[in-house]
Image (tube, rainbow, N blue to C red):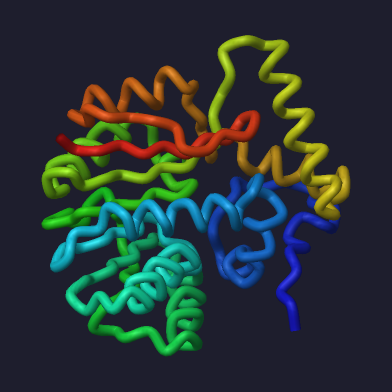
Amino acid sequence: MAKIDKVFSNPLGEIPPFTFNEKVAHVFDDMAERSIPFYREVQKMITDLSLTFFQEGSKIYDLGCSTATTSALVYQGLIDRGVTDFTIKGIDNSEAMCEEARIKLDSLGASKDHVSISLGDFLQEEIHDASVVIMNYTLQFTDPLKREAIIKKIYNGLRHNGILLVSDKLLQTNTDISRTFIDKYYNMKRLNGYSELEISQKREALENVLIPYTLEEETALFTQCGFKGVDAFFSWYNFTSFICIKK
């Protein structure tokens, strides 16, 4: 039976801050596909770029791996290419997400020698000998005061020609444009079956939890931390995906 997102479908008297708890984790795949523009297409692009820049014998980190959709796609891609010397490490600070991730990988028969899921704070985890690091809609949930430290750590842990892939919701600098982009986004959610109640309650729950940067701020963060090549490989209104290469 499909796990349909109904987390915010009933009126909530007091709306608590959004967390990736068991209720969210159970329906996260549906939530992501209906809430994130072109989610499947972005996943395909991230997988393709990961396979292109992966260096045999290196590590791939999926930081904030949620239910391991990205890790599973990259794993399968490497297996299909006949690559045997690789390690994928997914890290998430939600125990419920990690459990869903392990169930997904087990259902695919993924080798635990090649891909693992760890419960932990990626701000504290070591990044070492990586050719690919993925932060798929993760940086936006990271404390802004800690973002520079994690990006620097990623940069230092990457091999030469290694890449960082980041997808995030962004903030616009012009009020009129921002309002227009938000309207387009909420209309997308309506078309994907979310009610006005669900949209408004989730918006309130995400307040001060999801903290977006502007395009300029996000790009500056990557370049200031050492990345020489920073480019957007996907953009839809207030969502953008970046590839950052270490040279």
108 in relation to 188, above or below: below
Residue 72 placement: quadrant? bottom left
Out of 160 and 125, give the one closest to the viewer: 160
The N terminus: image quadrant = bottom right
Q: Is residue 90 left or right of residue 28?
A: left
Q: Is residue 21 left or right of residue 87?
A: right
104 in relation to 216, above or below: below
Image x and y of residue 28, in percent: 61, 64
Rendered residue at 87%/49% (across/down):
195
Q: Is residue 70 left or right of residue 42?
A: left
The C terminus: image quadrant = top left
Q: Is residue 171 left or right of residue 35?
A: left
Out of 89 and 12, give the one closest to the viewer: 89
Residue 90 placement: quadrant? bottom left
106 in relation to 77, above or below: below
Rendered residue at 58%/53% (across/down):
41
Out of 120 and 37, give the one closest to the viewer: 37
Rendered residue at 52%/35% (across/down):
240
Out of 68 and 145, give the one closest to the viewer: 68
Image x and y of residue 184, in percent: 77, 31
Rendered residue at 19%/38% (across/down):
246
Image x and y of residue 175, in percent: 67, 11
Image x and y of residue 9, in percent: 82, 57
